[in-house]
Amino acid sequence: MSTPETTSAEAFWRYAGGKCLFESRGEAWRDIKAWITALPPVVDTIHLPSVSEPFLAWTTSGEVDFQEREGGGPWITNRIKKGSFFLTTGGAPYDVRWKAVSPEPFEAMLVFVELPVLQRALEGVFGTDAIHVRLRDASAFNDEVLNPLLAVLREELMRGQANPLFVEAIAQAISVHLARNYGETDEELHSSSPSL
């Protein structure tokens, strides 16, 4: 399958490789989209399209040497394991590859926060300066607040019949946390080094 330069949040997981185990569907998931995927232990190179929504990848099982690069640049290598996050906030498509270093299956949850929810969170945190704020990209990080929020979101996803109010509350909590901890002004973004 050829990979487009950009895609929707709903179609992204199809390009990430692996098998979708659970997928968010229905009215409860209007503010946030989520998938749980089982990924192969070794992948040579996958070209991932960009999306406009902020994207969190949360490793829920396994340990891999994960490499990423943007625009044919040098590969950046990180060891990721259960609890590791990636935050990608749009921009250019990029390439990834990985190799398992443990016998556990490599599984991840992919989460996309809808832009209106994030915008409300940015406005709540930054006020009128919110129009000058973006989330920064971050690779292979740990976050002790996101871990339980995504664990609860994962449980709700696996229920089959998600509660709309509960999912909305989790989406808002995730958005506010991202705004508080990963939001940067345009000036801060231009002065920091780029990351996938």
Image: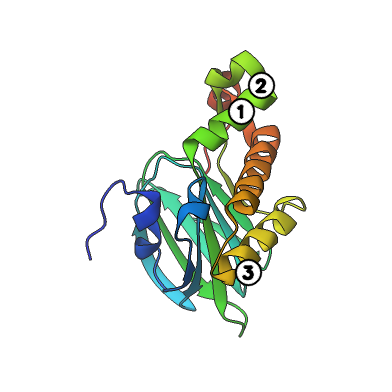
Q: How many marks?
A: 3
Q: Which residue is mark 1?
A: 122
User: Which residue reaches farthest top?
Assistant: 128
* Above or below 187: residue 169: below
Q: How many neighbours does mark 2 have within 10 angstroms: few (below 14), some (14-19), or many (20 or more)?
A: some
Residue underneath mark 2: 126
Describe residue 12's horizontal placement relative to residue 135 as left or right.
left
Residue picked out by circle 3: 60
Q: CA distance from mark 2 to mark 3?
A: 32 Å
Q: Looking at the picture, tell me which residue is in the foreground, 95 or 21.
A: 21
The image shows residue 163 at horizontal and vertical percentages of: 60, 58
Question: Could you tell me the amino acid type at mark 1?
Answer: Leu
Tell me the number on the disc at residue 137.
none
Residue at 49% in and 79% down: 41
Determine if residue 74 is in view. Answer: no
How far from the left and from the top, in percent, is residue 115?
Answer: 48, 36
- The front one of 43 and 54 is 54
Secondary structure, mark 2, is helix
Precedes in sequence: disc 3 or disc 1: 3
Mark 1 element type: helix
SS assignment at label 3: strand
Q: Quadrant of residue 63?
A: bottom right
Q: Is residue 193 above or below residue 13?
A: above
Vertical comparison of 171 with 132: above or below: below
Residue at the extreme left: 2
For discs 3 and 1, the disc positioned in front in the rendered view: 1
Residue 102 visible to the viewer: yes
- The amino acid at mark 2 is Phe
At which x and y percent is residue 102?
A: 62, 81
